[in-house]
Amino acid sequence: DIVMTQSPDSLAVSLGERATINCKSSQSVLDSSNNYKYLAWYQQKPGQPPKLLIYWASTRESGVPDRFSGSGSGTDFTLTISSLQAEDVAVYYCLQYYSSPHTFGQGTKLEIK
Amino acid sequence: QVHLVESGGGVVQAGRSLRLSCAASGFAFSTYAMHWVRQAPGKGLEWVTVLSSDGTNEYYADSVKGRFTISRDNSQNTVYLQMNSLRVEDTAIYYCAKAGCGGTRCYSNRWGQGTLVTVSS
């Protein structure tokens, strides 16, 4: 199984500053046959289901603010929030869907400093 | 507008069975894969299973393989999760989620509100 490891576990950032969350996979999630990276990012606020932010590692879901962006290679990925807003306080998860079982990272809790 | 409503959760004794349902609306159900994902109280997300749009391909987390079965009825726009031999560690909110494509190698892009399953000893 592919193990997804996020860092840090928690993060405190000032309003308007950049927040960066990392996700590392134990194996590549890049499919060389189509050049797709099978990596998604989710945001979960307390008492709510997760919300998709990014898929194929860097494609922003419709309706997601453009301050959210994703990047990365075959094993190392980053979610960046360019200018933190109060409503971005949440837990963020990465997910690999390259192979089954799909696996989530352990989550990163983002707070306001 | 995509709408997913889970039902069937509740309190059950360890070793017993439970079947969850997820009623879908607002999209062409038969063309999308469907996932179940769970979240134990205060813990992170755990992917459980996926079923392809045509029902021919299914995969499971190691923790539930051989005990849980996913199925779907495309005529009723419903996906099910049959859970047998339940364990205390299966206690969680169970979310059904619509995939972004028909195959199993796909992310989930819409989620239900979840249904709570509590397994007592």
Image (cartoon, rainbow, N blue to C red):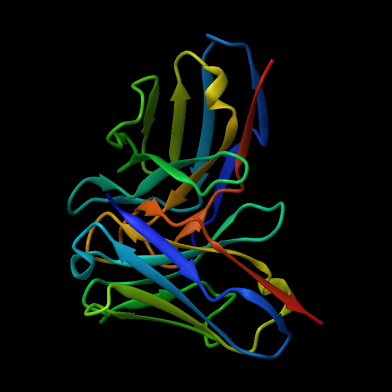
**A41 on left or right of B39:** left
The answer to whether any part of residue A75 appears in the image is no
Question: x and y percent of residue A107 in the render?
Answer: 60, 43
- What percent of the width, then of the height, locates residue B16? 66, 90
For the residue pair B115 and A51, the one nearer the viewer reads as: B115
Q: Is residue B69 above or below residue B44?
A: below
Give how far across and how far down residue B106 sits, in percent.
31, 57
Query: Residue drawn at (17%, 50%), measured in percent from left and top?
Result: A34
Residue B111 picture quarter = bottom left
Q: Is residue A18 left or right of residue B16?
A: left
Q: Residue furthest toward the right?
A: B121
Which one is nearer the viewer's eye here, A104 or B5?
Answer: B5
Residue at (18%, 66%) from the top-left corner? B31
Q: Residue A109 occupies which quadrant of the picture? A: top right
Residue depicted at 42% across the width and 52% down the height: A96
In the image, residue B43 above or below residue B30: above
Measured along the vertical axis of the image, is residue A20 above or below residue A109? above
